[in-house]
Each structure stands twice: as structure tokens, then as C-alpha cells.
Image (cartoon, rainbow, N blue to C red):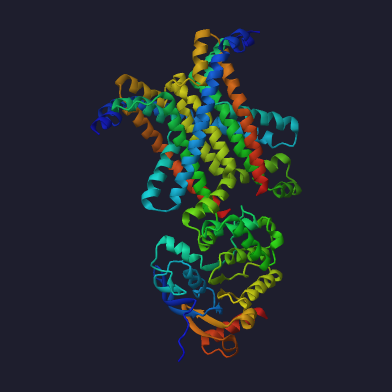
């Protein structure tokens, strides 16, 4: 037992690692802010294309969505970070993560928005057009607000997935939370910093996960 | 030309193809194992939760929350690097398999549970009124209905978690990413990475189309 | 005095409380073999709760319930499952299993709870479906049936287990008016076949014609009981009079 506490919950080591981990957490937060905004905007744009009646817009959008949902974000990230220099393009780890996440998250958010758009009945579009709104106005003022409300739980759970996913940035040496914790582990030969990092993730994500569970149950009962 | 030389060099493809095929095999069988055991464990947990006993519900909810809130990569590193210092040594592939199974089980449990609670109370009562035991109602009445409604979600979640086998590269499992990574380092070419991406496309693109088909099918049935 | 035969269903001093609220208060009711007892009363009078206590979908707070002399209360889970086979139940909402065919709906409990072999269970199911006039729908899915047909399948599902008493909880309340008749006809046939039944329902006309005895409940107690002609023709208590005038007012 003592052995176990020493290996995973060593207070001294946690205290030493705190400044490093807090800096890492700050990077993770910044990263989350950027990639979530990028993913939401990319996903919204893609979902509008994928919901279009024009096959020339719709099919490429679907193709994009399916490709980037099929490739694991980790290999995408490595390909961008380690591959681009071969054609003379050097990107910082932060930019590489942003590009990889933009491609991956847009595809996921697009699927969510698309099912939201599908959930809004045709009658809504027809009613809006009948009152003289343009197609773009119909989408912006009538369809999307309802669509987004309908898929809010899915959006929230994808946000949780993205926050967790930022931990893969450690693979390209971006000094976010997991990278910092793993550094501290390597230096101290002790896993307590990793446990501490887990605690920090929990601090933010546990409440969100609870909310999502509530959400899902509430929705399923009314439907 | 430059581009093809860097990303799709035929010689390098030929050299590393056998190793990569072996790696694809590793990825596939770990994924299959994870999906089978994750679905089974998740269903079991949801079934146990249905008994509504506090001492069962509490640990199940706690487990499902933790596994859904923690990044799998963090869990893998803790297990892989932490356990040896308390005398437990698990092989790399087993750590990968174990964590992904637990994470999938947590999501599956939540998916099932949400649907089970949404089924009308009358389904439980009709079963019990005809003399079926609680377990029989669960197995013959509740689960088949929940499973049918949840198939799209279960397929999607299983695919997402299967792709996380790529995390195995971080702890040295000889799956696609790790084999491609070392091939890239040896060859000084980005071609193995492209090959890895293509390998995933070959495995998962049809799976994505399948899940789209299933979603539509089940969408219209209801 | 001749010795009374033992009642098929006997409810003794039944009480049910939800927290502070007393839903059922010292209910005593005996139902003889082959008797059809109608339970009427305003909503919230506790009549459905009483019915649901009889197979313990609702847990009584105290009292006793016996089916052919065997207790429903104070028994193990396993014994309860076995006792529930003797008590058939038909719900307002039908509650057929939507994922199983009509035939499978009727065979499931026969096979899993009674342990009947497949062939026997299916033969019995077809016999019961024939009885409710739906043999030709054996392979249909519940979603393809009308409400009235679903309710008749639900009756066949309960009958196939050879219950000693059948409980009907507002069996026609969820049906369109034109479908009510088919379900009432099945219930009338059952009565003629000698089935013991307790029916909670608002079908006053049917109660008048078919019931052996009518029980009027209000505020968790049995206020009045008697043969239908007495209850409807010569109500004694003010509460029953008020209830009947309200109901007939509705019908008019």
C-alpha cells in the first residue's frame, strides 16, 4: 500500500512538478480554445455543404468528412508534423496540431451539425421561404438555431472528446499538460505527475461528463 | 515529382510493405478484441445497474465517468510506466487492449443505460406480470430493444475507439503508427507515414460507409 | 349455513401509502371463481393501484393478498415470479414487445417462465390468438396492428399462461371508440368461458351488462359494492350518486 502511494500519489514529487504542470495546463487550455473554435467553424461550413441540394458541393463534402473520420488524428498529426518538412514546409508543433485538429474536428462537427439540420423538419424551411426569407436567411435564422439546439448534447460531448484528444499533441513535443507530466515522470522516475495530470483533466471534464449524462437521459425521456 | 518522391516513393513502399502489413494485422486484431470485450463489459455493467442497488450503481457510475473524462493516453501512460514500480508488469499490447476496452465499456454502458431508462415502464411491467424474472425481462425484453435503437451509436463509438489503437505507438505496440514511425526514421522518407494513413483508410473508410448505411437504415425504420 | 368455497382472489386489509399520502385504506375484497368484478370510481380513487397490488407491480404497505389460498406477499422473488403466472394482467397501454412478432410475444413467457417446449407454446399461442380472433396475424409485428388488435394480442399473451384470475387495467381507455367493441367482445367471451376477472374500466354500459358485481371506490376505500342493477339503479351513498351523475353527464 505504502509502495502504491509512493508510486502514484507522491506528494513531494507532485509539489515539485506543479509549476511545470500548470504551465502545461495553460498550453492545453490555449490549444483547446483555438482548436474548438476552428473545428466548430470548419464543421459548420462543411455541414452546410453536405446538406446542399447540389451534388457537386455535397459529394466532396461527404468525401472529406468520411476520409478524416477514418484516419486516426494521431497519424494525421505525425504526417503533418514530420511529413511536411520533406516538401520544404516547416511548421511548429502548435500549428501542426491546429491543422490536424482542424481537419479531424471539422469532419466530426460536420456530422453532428448535419444530423441536426436533418432533424429540423422540411416544413420549417418551407414556412420560412413562404414568408419571403432567402435560402441563406432561412438557414441562419430558422434552421440552424433549431438544429444546434437539437444536437447540443452531441456538440458538448465532442468538445469533451477534443479536450482529451489534445493530449496527443505530446507526441510532437508540444509542451501541453500530458507532455509536461510525462517529462516530470521521466525526470523523477515516478508516475505521480501523470496522476496529477489526470486529476487536472478530471477537474475540467468530470463536470462536463456529468452534464452530458443528464442531458442524454433528459432528452431520451421526452422523446 | 518532389511530392511523390517524399510521400509515395515506390522503392520505399516495396521495402516496408511487409512490415506494415504485419502491423495492420496487429491493429485489426487488437481492435476486434477491444470491440468484443468492450461491448460485452458495457452491456454487463448496464445490466447490473438496472438492479438499482446503491452499492452496484455507485461504482459503475464512477467508473463510467472516469473512463469518459480521462484521456486514454494518460491512462495508458499511468498503467504502463506506473505499475512496474509496484511490481506489476503488463505487456504493451495488453495495456493498450485493457484501457481501450475499459473506455469503450464506459461509453457502451452509458449508451445502453440512457436507452433502457427511456423504454416505457410498461415494458418492464408487462414482462414481470407474465411471470418472467427480472433477469429474463432484461435479457428478452429490454436488451433486444435497446440494442436495436443503439446500434448506430454503438458502431460509431466502436470505430472511434478502434482508431485509438494508434496510441499504442506511444508505449511501443508494433501497430501501424509505430511501425510507420520507425520506418520513416530509418528511410528518411515520409512515404511510410503516407502508407500508414492509407492503411487506416483501407480499414476504416469502408467501416465509415457501413456506419452511414446503418444510421440511415435505422433512422428510417423508426 | 353452507361452507363458502375458498375465493379465487382474496384481498385482506390492504393498505398502500406513498410517503404521507394514503392511497389505499383497509381494502377487503373477495372474488369467487368465475366471477367478473368491475371496479369503478373517479381517477385517483386508488382502483388501478389496488389492481397493480394484486400482482405486486405496486408494493402494498400492509395487508394480505391470496390467490386460491396461496399468498402473494411475504414470499421470495422466485415464488413471486411463479405466482405472477397465476395472475394475468392487461394494461391500458398494451405494452406488447415491439421487437418480437405477435406469436413470439405470446410464447416468450410460456417458454421462459413456464418452461413449455417450443412446439407446445406455439400451439397454445395460436389457440389463444384464435380465441381473440387474430390467428391470421401471428407473424405480424405489433407495430402493424391497430390498437384494438394489439390489446387482444396482449390478452392472448396473458391467457396463454393459464392464469387463474385476469386483471384488466382500463383495457379500452387508450383505444379509438370504434375499436373498443372488439376488445369488450373478447372479455365477454372470457366471462362466458368461466374466467375469473377484475376489471378497472370506465365502460359503464359494459359493466351494467356483463359484471356480476360492481365495486365503487373513492379516496382509497371501497364505498359501495353490489350487483350492477343495485349500484347503477339504486345507489346508496352520496359519493356514488355524484360520481354516476358526473359520468352519465359525460356520456350525454
Q: Position of residue C125 (x, y in %)?
A: 63, 61
Residue B201 horizontal side relative to residue A189, left or right: right
Q: Position of residue B80 (x, y in %)?
A: 38, 26
Can residue A140 be seen in the rendering of this structure? no
Quarter of the rendering occupied by the N terminus of chain B = top right
Residue found at the far left of this picture: A2
Residue A21 horizontal side relative to residue C112, left or right: left
Compare residues B205 and C36 and report the one nearer the observer: C36
Instruction: Say above or below: B44 vs A182.
Output: below
Q: Position of residue C7 (x, y in %)?
A: 48, 79
Q: Residue at x 66, y 70 (%)?
A: C183
Write down the quadrant of residue C62 in the picture. Answer: bottom left
Q: Position of residue A158 (x, y in %)?
A: 53, 37
Write down the quadrant of residue C78 in the picture. Answer: bottom left
Instruction: Say above or below: B131 vs B91.
Output: below
Residue C167 horizontal side relative to residue C249, left or right: left
Write down the quadrant of residue A27 in the picture. Answer: top left
Compare residues A71 and C157 and report the one nearer the observer: C157
Q: Residue at x 41, y 69 (%)?
A: C73
Amino acid at each position: 500500500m505504502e509502495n502504491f502511494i509512493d508510486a502514484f500519489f507522491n506528494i513531494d514529487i507532485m509539489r515539485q512538478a506543479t509549476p511545470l504542470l500548470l504551465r502545461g495546463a495553460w498550453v492545453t487550455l490555449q490549444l483547446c480554445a483555438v482548436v474548438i473554435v476552428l473545428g466548430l467553424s470548419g464543421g459548420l461550413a462543411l455541414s452546410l455543404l453536405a446538406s446542399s441540394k447540389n451534388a457537386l458541393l455535397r459529394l466532396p463534402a461527404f468525401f472529406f468528412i468520411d476520409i478524416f473520420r477514418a484516419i486516426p488524428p494521431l497519424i494525421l498529426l505525425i504526417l503533418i508534423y514530420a511529413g511536411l518538412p520533406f516538401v520544404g514546409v516547416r511548421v511548429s508543433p502548435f500549428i501542426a496540431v491546429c491543422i490536424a485538429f482542424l481537419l479531424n474536428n471539422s469532419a466530426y462537427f460536420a456530422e453532428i451539425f448535419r444530423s441536426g439540420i436533418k432533424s429540423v423538419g422540411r416544413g420549417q424551411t418551407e414556412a420560412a421561404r413562404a414568408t419571403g426569407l432567402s435560402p441563406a436567411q432561412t438557414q441562419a435564422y430558422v434552421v440552424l438555431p433549431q438544429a444546434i439546439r437539437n444536437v447540443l448534447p452531441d456538440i458538448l460531448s465532442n468538445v469533451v472528446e477534443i479536450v482529451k484528444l489534445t493530449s496527443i499533441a505530446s507526441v510532437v513535443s508540444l509542451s501541453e499538460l500530458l507532455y509536461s507530466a510525462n517529462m516530470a515522470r521521466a525526470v523523477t522516475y515516478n508516475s505521480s505527475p501523470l496522476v496529477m495530470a489526470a486529476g487536472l483533466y478530471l477537474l475540467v471534464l468530470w463536470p462536463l461528463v456529468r452534464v452530458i449524462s443528464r442531458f442524454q437521459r433528459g432528452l431520451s425521456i421526452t422523446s | 515529382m518532389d511530392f511523390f518522391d517524399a510521400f509515395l516513393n515506390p522503392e520505399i513502399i516495396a521495402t516496408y510493405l511487409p512490415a506494415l502489413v504485419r502491423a495492420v494485422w496487429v491493429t485489426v486484431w487488437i481492435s476486434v478484441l477491444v470491440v468484443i470485450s468492450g461491448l460485452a463489459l458495457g452491456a454487463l455493467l448496464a445490466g447490473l445497474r438496472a438492479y438499482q442497488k446503491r452499492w452496484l450503481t455507485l461504482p459503475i457510475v464512477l467508473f463510467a465517468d472516469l473512463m469518459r473524462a480521462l484521456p486514454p493516453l494518460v491512462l495508458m501512460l499511468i498503467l504502463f510506466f506506473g505499475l512496474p514500480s509496484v511490481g506489476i508488469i503488463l505487456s504493451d499490447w495488453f495495456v493498450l487492449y485493457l484501457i481501450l476496452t475499459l473506455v469503450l465499456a464506459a461509453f457502451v454502458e452509458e449508451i445502453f443505460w440512457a436507452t433502457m431508462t427511456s423504454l416505457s415502464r410498461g415494458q418492464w411491467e408487462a414482462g414481470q406480470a407474465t411471470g418472467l424474472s427480472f433477469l429474463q425481462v432484461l435479457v428478452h425484453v429490454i436488451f433486444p430493444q435497446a440494442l436495436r435503437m443503439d446500434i448506430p451509436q454503438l458502431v460509431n463509438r466502436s470505430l472511434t475507439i478502434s482508431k485509438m489503437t494508434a496510441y499504442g505507438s506511444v508505449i511501443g505496440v508494433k501497430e501501424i503508427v509505430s511501425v510507420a514511425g520507425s520506418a520513416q526514421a530509418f528511410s528518411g522518407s515520409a512515404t511510410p507515414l503516407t502508407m500508414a494513413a492509407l492503411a487506416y483508410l483501407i480499414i476504416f473508410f469502408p467501416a465509415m460507409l457501413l456506419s452511414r448505411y446503418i444510421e440511415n437504415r435505422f433512422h428510417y425504420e423508426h | 349455513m353452507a361452507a363458502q368455497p375458498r375465493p379465487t382472489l382474496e384481498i385482506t386489509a390492504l393498505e398502500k401509502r406513498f410517503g404521507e399520502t394514503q392511497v389505499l385504506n383497509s381494502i377487503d375484497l373477495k372474488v369467487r371463481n368465475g366471477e367478473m368484478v368491475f371496479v369503478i370510481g373517479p381517477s385517483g380513487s386508488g382502483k388501478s393501484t389496488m389492481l397493480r397490488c394484486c400482482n405486486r407491480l405496486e408494493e402494498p404497505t400492509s395487508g394480505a393478498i391470496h390467490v386460491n389460498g396461496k399468498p402473494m406477499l411475504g414470499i421470495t422473488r422466485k415464488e413471486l415470479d411463479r405466482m405472477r403466472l397465476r395472475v394475468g394482467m392487461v394494461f391500458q397501454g398494451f405494452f406488447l414487445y415491439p421487437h418480437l412478432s405477435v406469436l413470439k410475444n405470446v410464447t416468450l413467457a410460456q417458454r421462459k417462465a413456464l418452461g413449455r417446449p417450443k412446439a407446445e407454446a406455439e400451439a397454445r399461442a395460436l389457440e389463444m390468438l384464435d380465441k381473440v380472433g387474430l390467428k391470421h396475424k401471428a407473424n405480424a409485428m405489433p407495430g402493424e396492428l391497430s390498437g384494438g388488435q394489439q390489446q387482444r394480442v396482449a390478452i392472448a399473451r396473458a391467457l396463454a399462461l393459464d392464469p387463474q384470475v385476469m386483471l384488466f387495467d382500463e383495457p379500452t381507455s387508450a383505444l379509438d371508440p370504434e375499436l373498443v367493441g372488439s376488445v369488450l367482445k373478447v372479455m365477454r367471451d372470457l366471462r362466458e368461458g368461466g374466467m375469473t376477472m377484475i376489471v378497472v374500466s370506465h365502460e359503464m354500459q359494459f359493466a351494467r351488462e356483463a359484471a356480476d358485481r360492481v365495486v365503487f371506490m373513492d379516496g382509497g376505500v371501497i364505498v359501495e359494492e353490489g350487483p350492477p342493477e343495485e349500484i347503477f339503479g339504486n345507489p346508496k351513498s352520496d359519493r356514488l350518486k355524484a360520481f354516476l351523475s358526473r359520468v352519465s353527464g359525460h356520456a350525454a
